Image (tube, rainbow, N blue to C red):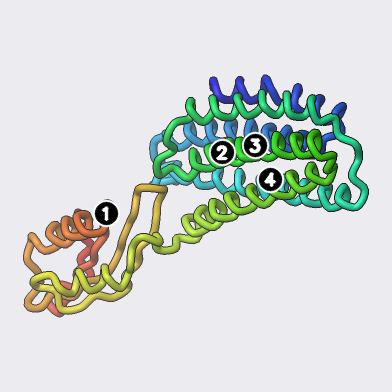
Amino acid sequence: MGVLALVLSYVGLEAAGGYFAGSLALMADAGHMFSDAVSLMLALVALRVGRRAASPQRTFGFHRAEVLAAAANASLLLVVAVSILWEAAGRWGAPPPVNAPVTILIASGGLAVNLLSLWMLGNPGESLNMRGAWLHVMSDTLGSVGVIVAGLLSFSFGWTRADAVASALIAVLIVRSSWRLLVEAVDVLMEAAPRHIDVAAVRQALLGADGVLGVHDLHVWTLSPGVVAMSGHVVPREGCFSPTLVPELAALLLARFGISHVTIQIESPLCVGADLHP
């Protein structure tokens, strides 16, 4: 909440300063800062919803509320970036005069606000939701630096196109960070295998365990960032199965791959269709 209040307190000043100074880069930075505020609000709501307990209808709980918030944040960032690029292209052909001293002064204040916000947010960890909010503020920090540099170039050398260039660079930075976040969020929602886990290696690890003859219908996916699940069918080598087989396989998967939620169905001529959840 502290970061949200800090960001909102400066948005109006930066937008007004950009308008009166004629600086698109500064107004773009203000727009980006406003998207930071929206991002932080989404992150706070998602955190609260994500902590709700599972229900009979939502047996996995609400963990993916954070993933949905991350996808919304990334989409918002992309919209902001496209609008900045569009305006920057128009200004390249006919750059308006820019009040460089005012631009530099206000952008410096924005940089201070962003640096303080990053310090207050700390390390986002594995949460896509908090990474989304953190990326908003980080890209806005880099944007503030770009605005200051553009102001200095305009003031020192009279290069008015520097404002359009800085705006375009801000947009490119936003696209780069938001696209990566969006791809990760979509991967989770599409239940793709986590990028750090090789499903073929998981299969070989199971086949290499004592008492395992075959593995099929193997699925690995992310429930929410930091929580990986696996389900699969295992054929034991002889008879039905040892009572310790499933717990041993679950321990193997946790130790080697960090897979914490394991569902294994044992299949054999003597014991068909037994569902075991360690």
Q: Are marks 3 and 4 in contact (CB under 8 Å)?
A: no
Give the number of the disc on residue 170.
Answer: 4
Q: Earlier in the sequence, mark 1 or mark 3?
A: 3
Which mark is on residue 145?
3
Is residue 19 visible to the viewer in this orientation of the structure? yes
N-terminal of the pair, mark 3 or mark 4, is 3
Closer to the chain start, of discs 4 and 1, is 4
The residue shown at (44%, 63%) is: 192
Q: Nearer the viewer, residue 114 or 216?
A: 114
Residue 138: image tag: 2
Label 3 and label 4: CA atoms lie apart by: 9 Å
Which mark is first along the chain, 3 or 2?
Answer: 2
Check the image and report above or below for 276 versus 2.
Answer: below
Q: Secondary structure at mark 3?
A: helix
Q: Callout 2 environment at 10 Å: few (<14), some (14 to 19), or many (20+)?
A: many
Local secondary structure at mark 1: loop
Q: Above or below — where is 127 with respect to 212?
A: above
Mark closer to the chain start, 2 or 1: 2
> For the N terminus, which image quadrant?
top right
Q: Amino acid at mark 4?
A: Ile
Mark 4 lies on a secondary structure that is: helix
